[in-house]
Amino acid sequence: MYSEWAPLQREIQCNKANQSVLQKFPAAAGKEIVCSVVKHLAKNCSTSTIAVDLEEDKDVKWTIEVLCFGLSLPLTEHEAIRDCVNIYCDWLTSLTSPLESVPKPVIENPNLYAREIIHHLLNLFVPRVGSSVDHVKRQSAQCQRVLRSIETVALDSTILTRSTWETMLKFLLAANDSLLAPPAEKADIAEHLCERVLSVLFEIWILACARCFPSPSLWKTFRNMCVDWRHHDALVQQWHRINHALLSRLLKIMYGPSYPELQICIPQCTKDLANSTNTSNTRTSSTACTPPGQRKPPMRPFSAVTAPLTQKTSSKSSSTSSNLCKMASPLTPSIGTGQLLLDCSLTMAPNRPQCNSILNLFGAWLFEAALAGVMLHPCHSETAQKQDRRTNSLSESRHSSLAVDYCSDKNRIADNTYECGRAEACGTLCRIFCAHRTGEEILPVYYARFYITMYYGLQTDDSMSNEVLSSILFNSCDLLRVDLAGAQILVPDILNALELVLSDSSQKFK
């Protein structure tokens, strides 16, 4: 979205609004000034009886220069940092219900000073290299205090201007980028704040969409920065959580309250799997984003229950799929002791969305994943390379990035790195096209890409993938019954696949 707009990453990352004039002096001199001034201010804030006599703008501006420098002190000065945070959080109440300790100039011009304060608070989220675990925990506690104050302002304030909203969103983007963009390390500040700082960003961003819609450049920046943070599991989980909540609400609005409850389980996020430059390199680091000791094994997708049909269905697979499928008796003795799982019990919602709508949203990723690591024939490879853009605007990378040239190393034939993901994508595409209703129009480009995907998935030669073939046959029971334009082209490949699966003499399909 907004791909033609320029992002604001450089502006956010190189912003000097969080620098104090005290940084031009020796660190010891700045520290001494901060400790003296902040101690006096914090004492007045805690008592809430008398406010410091800051009656003019120049007094407040000088004070916030001191507080700004205090937030950048080493974590060993945790008391001074804590006092600076307390003072600034109190002053932010000028946007909601001002406390007695808030200076008069701040109350009279709350948005101006709030923007300055928010810029300065970014210093608190900068990781301090070499800090002890105890100091990092204290820093995390102060950061959470700031996040709570920002949340309160965004939720309760009725006087926020567009400039203040944009400053708040840029602050959250910068704070997340400072914490999450570097490669993950054990016991660092990002480990303590990852989920919290992401949840606040998404929550306030959605709130801003209702009260002061972010500019296109901010949207582009948000998208680009998320790419740099995706080595954190919390980002993927938060992204799916928000998508699920928004989609659930959208379905109720579009199709009414009687529409079935949305139930989606997405155990992993696979994107551009076969393109190593997209999965291992980001703008901030070209090294592995997750240390070897913290890497987690990939989770098997749900379609793993559709194991090769000649194998005996395990009790675990049977119990997992019992809500969706019914066990059918063996079709022929040649299947042996295994049983065929048929997806006959699933019924389509009468007011379900059109196939085009679903493919517009997810088609780019599904077609990309369905051909991950596949060696395309020369004619298909040339076609893929000529496509400068997909029909879906959600992705900007090219389809050819996931296809392997047909003349590549023959050893790639035996590579099953992407087999599980391909099986899941092919099965999902089959279910989408099986939901086609008579007379419903599907774009020709979707038909073409689907049939090419099925062609490679139904192969029975040396390039055959057992799991992909099983997934296609399992999920395409109605494929030839729903009046798809040109579906007859798949009949020879489907018959060859069925003959291979049901044959007594087949030793290849294991």
Image (cartoon, rainbow, N blue to C red):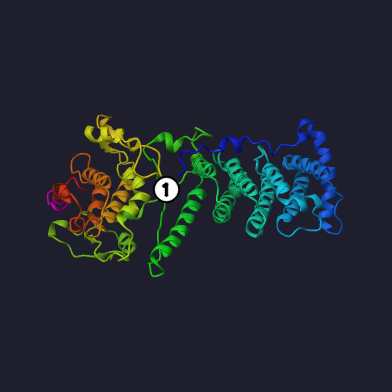
Q: Quadrant of residue 120?
A: top right
Q: Please say whether residue 306 is visible from this viewpoint.
A: no
Q: Residues within 10 Å of mark 1 (few under 14, many from 20)?
A: few
In the rendered image, residue 14 lying in the magenta stretch gets the answer no
Q: Is residue 97 above or below residue 415?
A: below
| Residue extending farthest bottom | 258
Q: Residue at x 40, y 66 (%)?
A: 261
Q: Is residue 100 left or right of residue 372?
A: right
Determine the secondary structure under disc 1: loop
Q: Quadrant of residue 31?
A: top right
| Range of residues picked out in magenta | 497-506
Q: Is residue 280 above or below residue 440?
A: above
| Screen quadrant of the N terminus | top left
Q: Residue at x 18, y 51 (%)?
A: 487
Q: Dominant secondary structure of the magenta stretch?
A: helix
In the depicted view, which residue is nearer to us: 262 or 493? 262
Residue 389 coordinates in the image, percent (x, y)? 35, 38
In the depicted view, which residue is nearer to us: 153 or 476? 153
Q: Is residue 73 left or right of residue 199?
A: right
Residue 490 coordinates in the image, percent (x, y)? 17, 48
- Residue carrying label 1: 269
In the rendered image, residue 500 lying in the magenta stretch gets the answer yes
Q: Residue at x 22, y 46 (%)?
A: 451
Amino acid at dot 1: Cys
Residue 363 coordinates in the image, percent (x, y)? 34, 48
Residue 452 coordinates in the image, percent (x, y)? 23, 43
Number of marks in the image? Answer: 1
Q: Please say whether residue 335 is visible from this viewpoint.
A: yes
